[in-house]
Structure formats: structure tokens, C-alpha cells
Image: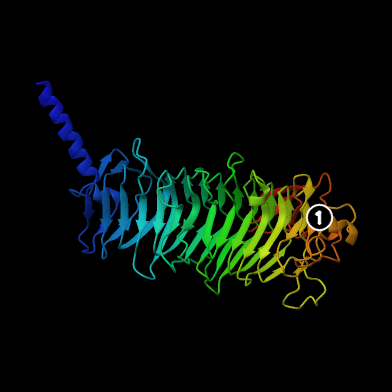
Amino acid sequence: MKKFLLNTAILLLVGASIAHATIFTTNGDGTVYSFEKLSTVSGSGVSKDGNQYVLYGTCIIAQGDQFVIDNGATVAFDEGSELIIEGSCDLRASSATKLTKWGNAQSCQGITVRGSEGSLTEVANLTFEYVGLRSASNMNVRSCHFLRHNGSSSGALYMGSDGASFHITDCTFEDCQKAAIGGAANFRCPAVIEGCTFLRNSQANGNVPQLNLTVASNIEIRNCLVEGDPNLTMVGGIAFSNFMGYTDTKAVVEGCIIKDNRYGITTLGIMDVVIAHNQLINNNHEVNANNGGSGISLYDPYLKQKAFISDNHIEGNLWGITVIGCGEVNIGKTEVPTDAEDYNPGRNVFVNNANNGVLYDLYNNSTNTVYAQGNFWNVVSQDKESIEKVIFHKNDNPSLGEVIFMPASDPAGISRPVADGDTDVIYRLDGTKVNGGALPHGIYIVNGKKVVR
């Protein structure tokens, strides 16, 4: 009897493993599916328990069919399970809908959207917990939460096809094992990322930043918060890379708060990059200053990268800005007419960027001349002799390029104080006062305090 029971138990376990490994594909006959619909289809791998659905194995929505998300449902994914959508889909929920793991599952995938070339997928109001979202088609993602992604792909939101474009707004990414947003090094995916919050991602503490992006024809990151985990010494904030030597690549980071990471923003390779109106604070969680810790690090061995940097507050990093290679770096150019293409007012503020007891506002580790006029440096007197002490360039090593940093900025042109007792006194980061009306997403000084909206 004991032997019979043991054999029966083994058969049940084997049967369960086979069930979990099954692949189900719909017929492609124009049917509209949901998890509710799939739970009524024999062999789909979807079962229902109250208002919760459980997916075992892989379920494929074939081309010709459609998938719509179930409003207000909770969907649990078993070990290795995945919903793959090859047809059209609508992933917009009107009420809270949660996708999570089933039991102790460790490597469940979540949802993969393949779609047809040029198709657009809408995603809204979903919570992805432990599982992720992968897309090979164009995608708009808004008001979604990505929590504790298990690292089954290189990003909780994975850009999974060269050329697919993404618009990501008002989303939150927290405590994911790898990058919050990422993709393959040979995938160029135009993206606009606005009003999002990134907290403590890349928990595996590998050399992977919270946003790990390959530059494309256009990538914009605006009005986001990128906050790291001080216990992680390998995780940067935002990285743009171009390992494949692509041309016509552009990246913009504007109006963001980037703090408490290994580094703030780093660029690698050929691109045009604009970094403006950001706060880069305490990105210093690198144990060896020779390996990182910059508020902004620019690197291009091909000497074709162009960088335009203005109106940033750069504080508490191991290095303020480091330049390695690159073609044209403009951190402020006020000696040209204001209508000139290369005019840059500068207005970057440097505060206490240091390592090994030495202040480094700007380190020009290239042979190029770098313009950095109109900035406010971390010295009491904004004169040439004082500023030389916080800039490393040709004067320190004749093999390096020169930094042209005079004239510096008048601090009164950088910021404006808010008087005590003022109520709802709001300034933009450039110092202009907001006089009523709805505020777009961004960073403001409200009654003397920095506020992200």
C-alpha cells in the first residue's frame, strides 16, 4: 500500500510538471479572449478561483485573435508561465488590476506582446508584481506599477524589438532585481519617459543601472525621480549606450531628480545628448572613485559625441562632471551671441563634489577643449584663480584639453529666494515665478522646498 501511494504521488507530481510546461495556442479565428474567457477553454492553462486567475504554462493568443485585460482581477503566474500575445490586445484597465506570481514561483515571465509590425498596444492601470512586461511592438504605458520584478528579463519593462517605440508616463518602478527599463544592446527603441518614479531598482547589485537604454533616433526622459538604494554599490541611475556605432542618435534628460545612485547619468558612444534642469545629488555609492561616482559622465572613444549641459544642480557626487573622449562638450558658452546655435547660458551649480578630500567640479580627461562658461562653481569667490582649484584640465596635465570657464555666473542668476510667510509661492528651476494655472509635470520650488509633480 505504501509503495502504491508513493508511486501515485510521483505520478501526480510528474503530471503537475507536465501541466505547467504545456503550451496552448488559440485558433486565430477572430475570437476575443480575456483571462475569464480563457478559464472556460479546456487546455488553456488558465484556472479561476473566485476573482483570481492562475496561469500554468504558456498561453499564446494567435494572430487574428484579440486579448483584453480583465478589470479588477488578480492574475497569478505559476513557475515559468507566460502569456504571449501575437494578435492585437488592449491592456487598459479601468480599475485596479494586478499581475503577480503564484505561490513560491521564482521565474514566471508575465506578459509578452509580439504583435504585428507597426501595431500599437495601450497599457494602463496595471500592477506588475514579480512579473514583467515585454513588448516587440509600439507601446503606450501609463499609470502602471512595476514592483519587485524577479529579473527573468533584463528589465521589468523590456523593449524587445529593434525600432519599436515606447511612451511611458506616470509609472512607478520599485525594487526590481534588474533594470526598471531595458532592452538588448542592438535594439534601438525610441522612447519618451515622463513623470515616472524609479526607486531602488537593480537589486541584484550587478553593473546595471536603473534605466539601461540603447540610444535611438530619440529618447527623452523628463520630470522623473530616479532614486537609488544606498546599500547598492554597483547600480547607476541612467545609462545611455551605443555599442553598435549607430548614428542619428539623440537623448534628452530634463527636469529630473537623480540621487543616491552609484552615478547619476552616464553616456557611452556616439550620440547627441542634452542634460538640462536636473538635480544630480549624492550619486556617490561607488567604493572606488576611479571606477565611477560622477553626477554626469560622458564617454566616447570615437570622439563624435555632442553634449549640451545647462541649468543642473550637481551636488554631493564623487565627481561633478567627467569628460572622457567625446567630440563637442558644451557646459556653458556665453561668449557667442545669444541667438547662436552653440549659445549656452551654463547656469550649472556645483556643490561639494569630492573624493579623497579633493573637490572635482569638472574633470576633463580628454584632449578636447571644453566650454564651461556661466556656471556657479564650488568656491567662495567666482574668480579664475579660485575656480582652477575645482577643475582638472590642461593646466594640471599638458596632455589634456583646456576648460574655458570664465566668465563664471553670478549666483543671483541661478536661483531666487522665497520669502518667509509666502503661501504657495512657486518657482521653476530656472528661477521664473509661476503665476497661477495648472502645473505640468516637473520639479518646482514651492514655498522654498523642492517638489516633484
Task: Work out which quarter of the rendered image holds the N terminus and state it.
Answer: top left
What colour-coding does the image apply?
Answer: rainbow
| Rendered location of residue 434, percent (x, y) | 74, 58
Q: What type is the residue that disc 1 sits on?
A: Val
Q: Residue at x 26, y 41 (%)?
A: 48
Q: Is residue 117 visible in this depiction of the protein?
A: yes
Q: Position of residue 206 (x, y in %)?
A: 52, 47
Measured as percent of width and height from the top left, residue 255 is found at 66, 58
Q: Quadrant of residue 436?
A: bottom right
Say left or right for 290 vs 193: right
Residue underneath mark 1: 390
Residue nearer the viewer, 245 or 260: 245
Decide: is 8 above or below 203.
above
Measuring from the top left, give residue 374's x and y in whole percent: 81, 65
User: Dot 1 surroundings within 10 Å: few (below 14), some, or many (20 or more)?
Assistant: many
25 left or right of 112?
A: left
Q: How many marks?
A: 1
Q: Is residue 9 left or right of residue 426?
A: left
Considering every residue shown, the one lying at the far top of the view is: 1
Instruction: Depth check: give the residue in front, 39 or 6.
Output: 6
Element on which disc 1 rests: helix
- Could one spot residue 292 in this view of the protein? no
